[in-house]
Image (spheres, rainbow, N blue to C red):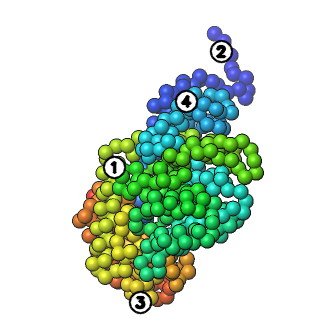
């Protein structure tokens, strides 16, 4: 019998069988390994780094593997514009459900009337709010970056700093605490249209009701940026701003979720708003939505939104709440240990997940730069931080910032906080200071410390 040869150049087709979703998404890591060994190796190295070193950066967290799975799924392929139920592309029936789920869970977590899960980041969420209500040249009043505030609150180098008139408030030079009377007086003089509270390096409880009273007195909107403390707020380990502020914003990775941002509104979500240049009056929530798309962003990252939905469900669990209170407990314990060893802990302790230490006051010549780098050499990961009224530049600094979200998540408690404080002290005491950014650590001491850190981390594996 004659078998016909395929024509030259034709590809022999063995009709491929469609995988089901489970098969398609399974073993994604090995798929990457065979597709791109170079990237795969680096990814493996990063996993090992995170597992084998102590993660004490207050701005970092560790999401669950369920969140990772949601990030790396086919939802990433879907493009659309607009919000669930009012999209500009076909095929949105599933992603509409996902976004609606993320929104309703976010509202439940934060007891909010309105939630917008589309911002690509915390910075983006802030920019959406700022540009939703301000005209070019309008006034913003916020905590200065070198006083614990965040760059996106109108620092000169930021987007908002370029297009708006910004004045900053400071912490008290003697106590490093917010001085609400002084903030009020400054606000009465400056008359901002937007008051921003919330910080990246402030260890004490923020009085959102007080900020709102100031905003009302000067006729400003209030935005509370809770990026660092939103996990604590969700669990009740820090008071919530949602019904005090007109807008509450947060990054979603700092409380332990996927990268991205979130905008929440409470009792002011239906407050009417009209741009100064005219246009129709609309509720504040709608103004935020219109300025998210088409105002500020294009297509939403639907895989991140899916991962946010997964994360918000986790946030509602008892386990998540317990973790948040544990974070605060651990931060308090760690701060107490530093105080006990004679360190200058700003404000004398902490109410939240982090605290600042003036390392320049610990040893002559010590800088934040040296602290960060010699600790990193020993497997302890922190960040140097410019302190309020710091005499050093942002590249050298006098401070270090420590946070406990990750070590707490992985199961560390009181005994480990004692050990960690001791080790940090050992390193900062032993390091030989040779300049603002020059130092030497004895190699034998360093490798011994690294090993001990690794042994400790092995007992508290990433979850
Ligand atoms: C980290 C942080 C942000 C920025 O969030 P990104 O998602 O990194 O852009 C905004 N505000 C505050 C107070 C922060 O600490």
Q: Quadrant of residue 421?
A: bottom left
Disc 1 designates what residue? 321
Disc 4 designates what residue? 94
Residue 183 or residue 143, whichever sits in front: 183
Mark 2 and mark 3: Cα distance apart in space: 88 Å
Mark 1 and mark 2: Cα distance apart in space: 69 Å
Sooner in the amino-acid sequence: mark 4 or mark 2: 2
Disc 3 designates what residue? 364
**Quarter in which the N terminus is drawn:** top right
Mark 3 and mark 1: Cα distance apart in space: 41 Å
Mark 1 and mark 4: Cα distance apart in space: 30 Å
Mark 4 and mark 2: Cα distance apart in space: 47 Å
Sooner in the amino-acid sequence: mark 2 or mark 3: 2
- Mark 4 vs mark 2: give the one in front: 4
Number of other residues with Cα within 10 Å of mark 3, as a class: few under 14, some 14 to 19, many 20 or more: few
Q: Residue 317's spot in the image, x, y percent?
A: 34, 43
What residue sits 30% from the left and 63% below the top? 330
Sooner in the amino-acid sequence: mark 1 or mark 4: 4
- Residue that sits furthest to the right in the current view: 277
Sooner in the amino-acid sequence: mark 4 or mark 3: 4
- Mark 1 vs mark 4: give the one in front: 1
């Amino acid at each position: 019998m004659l078998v016909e040869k395929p024509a030259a150049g034709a590809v022999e087709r063995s009709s491929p069988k469609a995988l089901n979703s489970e098969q398609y998404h399974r073993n994604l890591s090995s798929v990457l390994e065979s597709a791109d060994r170079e990237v795969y190796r680096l990814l493996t190295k990063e996993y090992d780094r995170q597992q084998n070193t102590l993660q004490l950066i207050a701005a970092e967290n560790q999401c669950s593997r369920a969140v990772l799975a949601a990030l790396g799924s086919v939802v990433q392929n879907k493009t659309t514009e607009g919000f669930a139920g009012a999209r500009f592309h076909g095929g949105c029936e599933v992603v509409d459900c996902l976004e609606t789920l993320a929104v309703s869970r976010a509202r439940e977590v934060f007891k909010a009337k309105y939630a917008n899960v589309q911002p690509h980041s915390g910075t983006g969420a802030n920019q959406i709010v700022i540009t939703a209500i301000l005209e070019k040249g309008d006034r913003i009043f916020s905590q200065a970056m070198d006083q614990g505030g965040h760059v996106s609150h109108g620092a000169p180098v930021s987007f908002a700093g370029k297009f708006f008139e910004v004045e900053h408030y400071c912490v008290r030079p003697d106590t490093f605490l917010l001085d609400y009377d002084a903030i009020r007086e400054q606000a009465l003089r400056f008359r901002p249209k937007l008051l921003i509270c919330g910080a990246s390096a402030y260890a004490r409880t923020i009085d959102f009701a007080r900020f709102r009273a100031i905003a009302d007195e000067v006729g400003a909107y209030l935005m509370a940026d809770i990026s660092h403390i939103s996990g604590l707020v969700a669990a009740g380990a820090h008071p919530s701003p949602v019904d005090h502020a007109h807008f509450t914003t947060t990054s979603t990775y700092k409380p332990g979720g996927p990268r991205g941002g979130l905008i929440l509104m409470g009792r002011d979500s239906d407050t009417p708003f009209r741009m100064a240049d005219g246009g129709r009056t609309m509720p504040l929530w709608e103004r935020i939505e219109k300025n998210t798309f088409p105002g500020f962003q294009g297509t939403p990252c639907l895989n991140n939104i899916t991962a946010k939905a997964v994360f918000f469900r986790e946030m509602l669990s008892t386990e998540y709440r317990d973790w948040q209170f544990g974070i605060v407990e651990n931060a308090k314990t760690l701060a107490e240990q530093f105080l006990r060893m004679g360190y200058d802990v700003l404000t004398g302790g902490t109410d939240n997940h982090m605290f600042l230490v003036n390392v320049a006051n610990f040893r002559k010549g010590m800088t934040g730069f040296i602290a960060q780098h010699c600790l990193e050499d020993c497997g302890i990961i922190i960040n140097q931080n410019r302190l309020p009224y710091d005499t050093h530049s942002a590249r050298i600094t006098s401070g270090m910032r420590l946070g406990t979200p990750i070590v707490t998540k992985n199961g560390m408690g009181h005994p480990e906080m004692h050990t960690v404080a001791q080790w940090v002290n050992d390193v900062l005491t032993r390091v030989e200071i040779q300049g603002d950014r020059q130092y030497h650590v004895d190699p034998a001491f360093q490798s011994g410390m690294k090993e001990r850190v690794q042994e400790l981390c092995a007992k508290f594996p990433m979850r």
